[in-house]
Image (cartoon, rainbow, N blue to C red):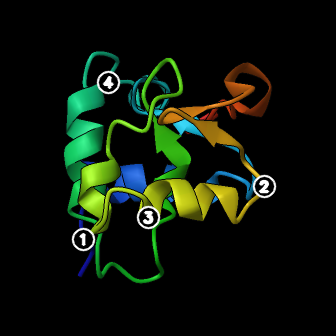
Amino acid sequence: MLTKETFYDRVYKIVREIPEGRVTSYGAIAKALGTAGSARMVGYALRASQGVYPPIPAHRVVNRVGMLSGKAAFGSLDMMQQLLENESIVVENDRVVDFKNLFWEPNYGE
């Protein structure tokens, strides 16, 4: 029996493709899925990703200006930053330094 891929599954597929040491945004993922304007739904999907296997590197997804807007979902307020810093991504004042150069553009479905 075939199962239909859900929106959350599609989000997870893209997020798993983000290279280590790079970040993308909720909006870029939504746009890549053909659902521009659904950045908030991408955030909901990532918040629900704890316990999903294989793991989802949700820490690599930030808001459109590089802010760690989803950091409360990581159990402690510094965990998202710590995970990014473990990948040599510099974060200052809850924002990815050099966001423009570290930004990864998803190409889902192309």
Indicate which disc, 2 or 4, sits on the residue closer to the N terminus.
4
Query: 30 and 76: which one is in front?
Result: 76
The answer to the question of whether label 3 and label 2 lie on touching residues, with beta carbons closer than 8 A, is: no
Indicate which disc, 4 or 1, sits on the residue closer to the N terminus.
1
**Percent position of residue 33, x then y:** 42, 33
Q: Which mark is residue 35?
A: 4
Tag nearer the camera, 2 or 4: 2
| Relative to 40, residue 76 above or below | below
The disc labelled 3 sits on which kind of residue?
Answer: Met
Q: Residue at x 44, y 64 (%)?
A: 79
Tag nearer the camera, 2 or 1: 2
Q: Is residue 107 visible?
A: yes
Q: Is residue 6 visible?
A: no
Residue linked to disc 3: 79
Instruction: State the separation of the CA atoms marked 1 and 3.
Output: 34 Å
> Please, what secondary structure does the residue beneath circle 1 have?
loop
| Relative to 68, residue 38 above or below | above
The disc labelled 2 sits on which kind of residue?
Answer: Ser
Indicate which disc, 2 or 1, sits on the residue closer to the N terminus.
1
Tag nearer the camera, 3 or 4: 3
Specify few, some or many for label 4: CA neighbours under 10 Å numbering under 14, 14-19, or 20 or more. some
| Relative to 21, residue 48 above or below | below
The answer to the question of whether label 1 and label 3 lie on touching residues, with beta carbons closer than 8 A, is: no
Residue linked to disc 2: 88
Indicate which disc, 3 or 4, sits on the residue closer to the N terminus.
4
Residue linked to disc 1: 3
40 to the left or right of 21: left
